[in-house]
Amino acid sequence: MSRARQSYQGVALVAPTSIPYQRYSIDTAHFWIARALKGSLDAAGIAPADLDGFSAASFSLFPDTVVGLTQHLGLSPRWLDQIPMGGASGVVALRRAARAVQAGDADVVACVAGDTNHIDSFRQLLSSFSRFSQDAAYPYGFGGPNAVFGILTDHYMQTYGATREDFGRICVAQRTNALKNPGAVMTKPLSMDQYLAGRPISDPITLFDCVMPCAGSEAFLVMTVKEAEKRQLPYATVRGAIERHNAHADDPIQLRGGWTLDIDELWQMSGYSPIDMDLVQTYDDYPVISMMQIEDLGFCKKGHAGEFLCGKDMTVSGDFPHNTSGGQLSGGQAGAAGGFIGLVEAIRQVTGQAGPTQVKGAKRAVISGFGMVNYDRGVCTAATVIEGGGA
Amino acid sequence: MSTLANLASNIADGSVKVVDLTHTLDPDFPVIILPPEFGQCARFRMEEVSAYDHRGPGWKWHNISMNEHTGTHFDAPSHWISGRDVPMGAVDEIPADKLVGPVVVIDCSEGAAQDDDFELTPQIIEAFEAEHGRIPEDAWVLMRTDWSKRSGAAYLNMASDGPHSPGPTPDAIRLLVEDRNIRGFGTETVGTDAGQGAHYTPPYPAHYILHGAGKYGLQCMCNLDQLPPTGAMLVAPPLKIKGGTGSPLRVLALVEN
Amino acid sequence: MTDPIQPPPKKNPLNRSWVSTIPPAARSRAALGLTAAAAEGRFMLQVCADCGATQYPPRDACHKCLSIDLPWQDIIPTGELLAETTIRATTDIYFRDRLPWRAGTVRLDAGPPMICHIHGDVKPYARVRLINRLDRSGQGVILALPEKDTPNMADDPHLRAISSDPSHRRVLIVDGRNPNTPDFAKALKDAGAAMILIGLSEDWLPFQGRKALEDVGAQIIPLDVTDTKSLQRLAGEFGGKIDILINNARYIRPGGVIDRTDTNLAARELEVNALGLMRLAQALGPAMCSRTADGTNSAVAWVNILSAWALANEPSFGSFAASQAAALSLSQSLRAEFRASGLRLMNVFVGPTDDEWHQPLPPPKVTPAAIARDVVRGLHGGFEDVFCGDVAKDLNERFRRNPKVLEREMTGGGV
């Protein structure tokens, strides 16, 4: 029933900014968002008062929304958006901002995600996260996402015969990448033996399958290619982007995401195929979800991600660079910034700004997002293919 | 020295002893039990209102509730159907001078120890008078049984055919009321009548005859063994309850040593 | 099979008693439908009246056709365990004290998948029976049980946590003079109660039932629900040892309002039936609430035996019925006050009982043995509401259908 999508031609992604994460912060989401925003605006030479488009994603702004942020941060945008989509928020923010810029509703949109993490704020966030979780998940042991993904991982392993080593390879490779990233929360190497000996958290999930909740923020700017060139900013273009929500609702347990419905169109729009990608950034709240994305994005058949990755080197110097900054598994999960981490790193990568984690010659990346365990599964999925001038 | 000044000094020096004939008002003290389909006598109950706490920081007090006939208590003539038209038959109407007066004590303790249904008969009264002289007019007559030394279930002494405790026969009460014109009759048991008093004619003769003649009753008393057969003075003023048929009270006796 | 719970050792007086905590209690209004069903131990879900789709989690609109007509219906409670996890870390303080905790996703034969508690005897990926019960927060939760009963299955930590199981627990039956007490004592002993205390009011009155109760091994202690002092004494002596309280104190006389001519019997009915409940709760409630996490023999349930006439007044016993309505209302307040502790309040609604006061009423009448059975059944299920006997069940059905119609029916207007 869908008409063909318009292309994202003429849209540039610039000024990727990541503020180094902290395990706990006594500061607020406003503080973290302001820092990332300033980082991107400074890089582009834009004064806050001149910014005409603003998009924010955060779980810990309460009682404020993005509206409160405009007054708090002295912004006067003519285009304003808030993305409540957690792990999908980066790609979704990009999609909306790109359309606003294409249509002329805004010249520059700053897309920012940030959250703080106080002691006990994770528990409080969980307990008021969603109505279905409150009604039908938390009363059953209050394992939070660990329990939901424990069930999901059990189902995946049982259905496809995946092993813990399959998950471990992802975690170990990302730790290797993280050791090159000075902003990552995890700073010690991780071996497969250490991974396998990890403390059980919610069977079959163990310690190194889980992300560390922390405070942090990420930002990038969306503007026209013309504007980016005028300002002499390295930029990436958007080759295609998709999103989908609450797909496959009748699957009793989630083994696939909404990407499967739109993935052909994504590759068609981009003019590329998976094999053309120089790096892959998946949403990695648990390694099983990264495997699900690698399958659903078309890198391999359903259920074969373990086997597929077994023959790959997922580090920045490998043949299948994946979550090059260490991802959330080794970088930490800073709330909604977890939905931005892969995208912001990918913009750095394809524009040659990734520094110590730079994948040599990287020009094209696919980034996918997965968000919001409303009850028993992630509801929001999104993906984009971007391209830059390369390193 | 005036009579009362004399009395005061006699009390002070112990030559007149004040004997307390009253049981403690206590939730566990038995009350008369009627068949379940009748209205029942309320037990004594006490609820704290405050105890130097947030409900009243500087004081302690209780709300209490009970029947007029709970614990050691006074029966006014209006308590019984036979006395319902007796003038001044309610506790608030009883003349104050009737609340203090002479008392004689007929000792039935030996008989009551042998027989739970021991009866006070005219013969026993006459035998008492033969020893201690005729019962004076307008005196209280108390029937000592030492029943007050019983407690718990032994006090009511309920059996499947009702309670068993001593009391006067109809003739004995008639003798006291009609011939001796006493002021009132008192016992240590839960009523002025015997436990099985329902089976006399008239039923409950002490209640029926005493109150029909405008006489008073006292029951659930104790310490009668500390009173002389004659010569003591009884102080028994019920609470002045409007239209009341009786009241719990403190019964005291003044006894000359 | 489940390892049987062993009789708990005597408490170490040097150890602090565990503080009461409850599992997550917040629910949407729709989800309270599950709680209402769990209060009676029913497995119910919303089923769309327009398209027939079964809904879970509870919703305000059908996820298939957007209908807002989603009545709760009894559902065949069978399904298949698709996947599971054993939670070994949580930020919730209730579950943190009870780890590890087994949970999983069951696909109900009737449709939706449900995350639920998994009984320890359920084999991986097996067929299961589901039950809907109240957890310690007083909210409905789903527990998957093995398809067939297994040895000692009631001793499973999941099941023990949501039941009010009398086994290894100490029980106080409030009114030894109630004709149902001997059956209660026997049923609770058979259910494994460790100690049975029986209150006796007015020990100055004869008590024929003493021997029968002592033969069951019960201890008889002075207790009169109208006497605050006696309750304070009881609390002082036994307050820390009562795990289940069964309030069967009852004063009943025929008559309504005008045919009574005075308020004395009504006052006594209220004193015993309503204020007695209040006095008991004031004396014993705090200690019980503080002991809901006290190991195997923790305080777990407060049971009131109420007349079903609490729901709708029976005019031939109108004043008594009013006292039962008062008791019911007080019990709702008490239940709310117990909430933070996890102590369960169960009301057992009975129809006319087979005793002297209901002698002129036609059958069916409820026997003491039947009430005792339902008390134990309710404790095993951890229920809040139990309707005992055909009259009580019938009255409850009519009450739910239309309370105003029932009011008229109670006076014979519905013939």
Image (cartoon, coloured by chain):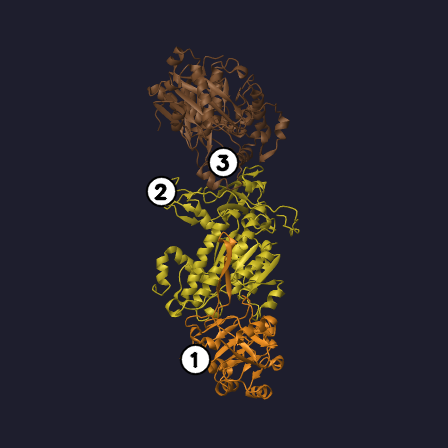
Chain colours: A brown, B orange, C yellow
Q: Amino acid at mark 3?
A: Gln
Q: Are marks 2 and 3 in contact (CB under 8 Å)?
A: no
**Up-down: is A8 above or below A130?**
above
Label 3 crowding class (10 Å Cα cut-off): few <14, some 14-19, many 20+? few
Q: Amino acid at mark 1?
A: Gly
Q: CA distance from mark 1 to mark 2?
A: 77 Å
- Using the rendered image of the protein, determine whether residue C366 is visible from the camera's viewpoint: yes
Please tell me the numbered disc located at residue A124.
3
Q: Amino acid at mark 2?
A: Ser
Q: Kindly indicate the quadrant of the structure image that contains residue B123.
A: bottom right
Chain letter of disc 3 in the image: A
Residue at x 59% of width, y 27% of height:
A168
Please tell me the numbered disc located at residue C266.
none
Q: What is the x, y in percent for residue A257?
A: 46, 30
Q: Is label 3 in a helix, a strand or a loop?
A: helix
Q: Is label 1 in a helix, a strand or a loop?
A: helix
Chain letter of disc 2 in the image: C
Label 2 crowding class (10 Å Cα cut-off): few <14, some 14-19, many 20+? some
Please tell me the numbered disc located at residue C67.
2
